[in-house]
Amino acid sequence: MSRTVVASENAPAAVGPYSAGISAGSTVYLSGQLGLDPATGALAEGIEAQAKQALANIGALLEAAGLGYADVVKTTVLLADINDFAKVNEIYATYFEEPYPARSCFAVASLPKGGLVEIEAIAQRA
């Protein structure tokens, strides 16, 4: 099975030994996205802005792979504070429609760069 890197100028570049995304067959795996502005590399201010930016970064990577939010089948949401779940969930719901992707959500001790939320996604080509 061939694998190709998924990247976009409209999403932060990988900052370590990993790819922002990998397309393998009909499946696209997107690495966790923080609320980083791809132009500045700075984190957005606050949980809502970081959630929107993380989801926008995912959208840019999906677009680079020729896909959209409707093609996402699974997401994982990591939160620095589980008390932010409702705020992130409200924003998340504006990016996805029924049938919603499967999802896991975890509270973690900390996220890279002091992020408040990180979201990864798996998408499937029809």
Image (cartoon, rainbow, N blue to C red):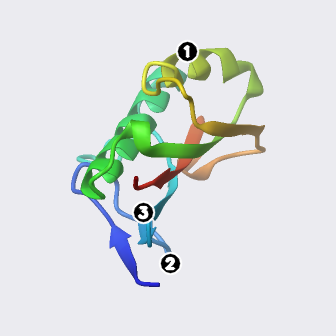
Q: Nearer the viewer, mark 1 or mark 2?
A: 1
**How far is disc 3 from disc 2 in space, using C-alphas?**
10 Å
Query: Is residue 6 left or right of 16 when viewed as pictured?
Result: left
- Taking depth in this image into account, of 109 and 77 the one nearest to the observer is 77
Residue for point 56% across, 29% down: 100
Identify the amino acid type marked 3. Ala
Quarter residue 66 falls in: bottom left
**Residue holding disc 2:** 17
The circle drawn on residue 90 is: 1
Residue furthest front as drawn: 126
Residue 113, position as x, y percentages in the image: 54, 49
Residue 23, position as x, y percentages in the image: 41, 68
**How far is disc 1 from disc 2 in space, using C-alphas?**
33 Å
Residue 50, position as x, y percentages in the image: 47, 31
* Label 2 CA crowd tier, 10 Å (few <14, some 14–19, many 20+): few
Q: Earlier in the sequence, mark 1 or mark 3?
A: 3
- Labels 1 & 2 near each other (Cβ < 8 A): no
Identify the amino acid type marked 2. Pro
**Residue holding disc 3:** 20
Residue for point 69% across, 36% down: 80
Residue at disc 1, secondary structure: helix
Q: Nearer the viewer, mark 3 or mark 2?
A: 3
- Labels 3 & 2 near each other (Cβ < 8 A): no
Task: Give the vertical position of 1 relative to 60 (above or below).
Answer: below
- Taking depth in this image into account, of 43 and 55 the one nearest to the observer is 55
Task: Give the vertical position of 124 relative to 79 (above or below).
Answer: below
Residue 114, position as x, y percentages in the image: 58, 43
Residue at disc 2, secondary structure: loop
Q: Earlier in the sequence, mark 1 or mark 2?
A: 2
Residue for point 27% across, 46% down: 40
Query: Is residue 35 left or right of 87 when viewed as pictured?
Result: left
